[in-house]
Amino acid sequence: MHRSKQYGESGINGMYKKMRYQRKNRKKQREPRRAGHEIPLSLFYLKYFAYLFAGVLLIVLLTAALFVVMWSNEGIYPARYAEEQVKLAAPLIEQADTVSKELIPELCRYVVFDEEGHILDGDLQGRAAGKAWEAVEGNLSKPGRQIGGQYYKIIRREGEYCVLRFRIVAQYKSAVLRKYLPPPEVLILLVFFLLVSVLIIGTALRFGRSMRRKMAPLIAAADRIQKQDLEFAVEKGKIREINAILQAMEDMRAALRQSLEEQWKQEQWKQEQISALAHDLKTPLTLIRGNADLLADTPLTDEQQEYADCVMENAVQMQNYVQMLIGFTRSVPGTSVCRRNTDLTLCLREVRKQAERLCRIGQVELSWDCQLRKREVYAEPGLLVRALLNLVDNAVEHTPRGGTVSFRAAEDGSCLIFTVSDTGPGFSGQALKRGKEQFYMEDESRTTAKAHYGMGLYIVDTIVRQHDGELLLENDPVTHGACVTCKIPVTVHP
């Protein structure tokens, strides 16, 4: 079996065992990689800003070169080309007998109106023709102000008007390109913005990948610490600020490792002391049991016989507890819960007998209320009795003389509910939150002359959880005393 599994993956003991196992089986310790020349994070950012600036400058040069190439290859007309052609064609159109398509310059469209504004000829129709007539009437405001905007040339002829529409913008010489592409100036701007967008996205992705690589040692260190693997050396990078964080994590890892080792040693010492004490308890318990046997062989009154039986039964029970404690501290197999179908009547009979004795010794009254219809529960009988007796003992310990300890057993659907309450001072707010913790001994509200070691409710909670149940701590709203409830599933296996 893997040693880390044997000792458990959680808790100080399991964590340290895992650390020691990894250290023992590692052939050589991984040395930290020495960082080269460190640079500040601001310089790292500046490098990518320089990449971006250089890329934008290169795109400007490329788009300018593209425009120059198109111009030098006579692939486009200059921006004023259409206007110049209109100026040359205007006298010819004015003097011609009729306006024909052959008289219209290549980059222009036209429409001919009579003096009433009716269309006589032309390739401008509908709204475009309406705009041209507005130009004739002088009602067209701010023509051609935007890039590629429309300009109009009005030629007065006898009894009619010829309106030429053109643009002052660079144009392709190819009619196909003019039909399917935006003007060259607009196209250059679109290409520029597209390339800049690609550059920004590419730079951002490259920056992100680079940052992930720089942050990889930090993420790896945090991940290994989270997995409780403290046997590693933190690698350093080239970013000064990230290395400072990595150094802090290295210091934290070393301090945590040292702290866990010290706590593990203390835990080991505690377990050794408990194991030794449990072992030493066996001798006086054996003597008590032996003397109880001898006492039982002598003539006794009924009352004395009852006392002798009580001594014998509790001595046997204490021996069982001591054996379980020894097994627990040594982590040997065989201490797991062995659940089976258990007779509730026998268990509760034993609990009541012991509870009456505890209450008689503590000089308190026992109130017993059992309303169970079920006769069996899937549980380990010894542990179930132990848990309920711990609750009763805890209640008797904190109940003043003449008070009352109440034991109630009921059913709620598929659960058995055992409730033990008392008329003592009740739980403090802190005890309600932490009362189930091991060795918790804060006792500001339940002061008593008896010493306790913070184990009772912890043991009960452990047993209840081993039976898939739940332990609830509260104060009785009527008596204001402590009230502890155990909910245990009533499942019975065939």
Image (cartoon, rainbow, N blue to C red):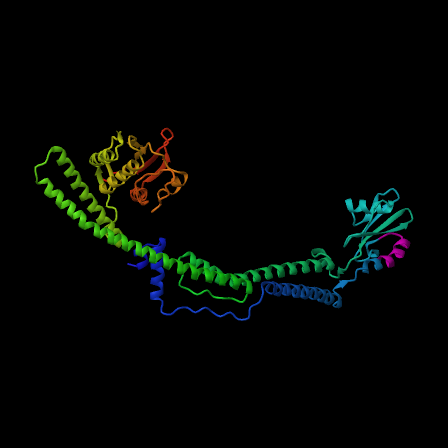
Residue 473 place in picture, x, y as percent: 36, 37
Which image quarter is the C terminus in?
A: top left
Q: Is residue 286 magenta?
A: no
Above/below status of 262 relative to 464: below
The structure residue drawn at horizontal position 58% and vertical position 63%, both measured from the top left corner, is 41
Residue 137 place in picture, x, y as percent: 87, 44
The structure residue drawn at horizontal position 38% and vertical position 30%, both measured from the top left corner, is 477
Q: Nearer the viewer, residue 385 or 401?
A: 401
Outermost residue to the front: 449
User: In the visual, does 214 lie left or right of 462?
Assistant: right
Above/below status of 215 relative to 484: below
User: In the visual, does 36 lie left or right of 489?
Assistant: right
Which image quarter is the N terminus in?
A: bottom left
Residue 331 in sight: no
- Part of the protein shown in magenta: 86-99
Quadrant of residue 264 within the rendered picture: bottom left
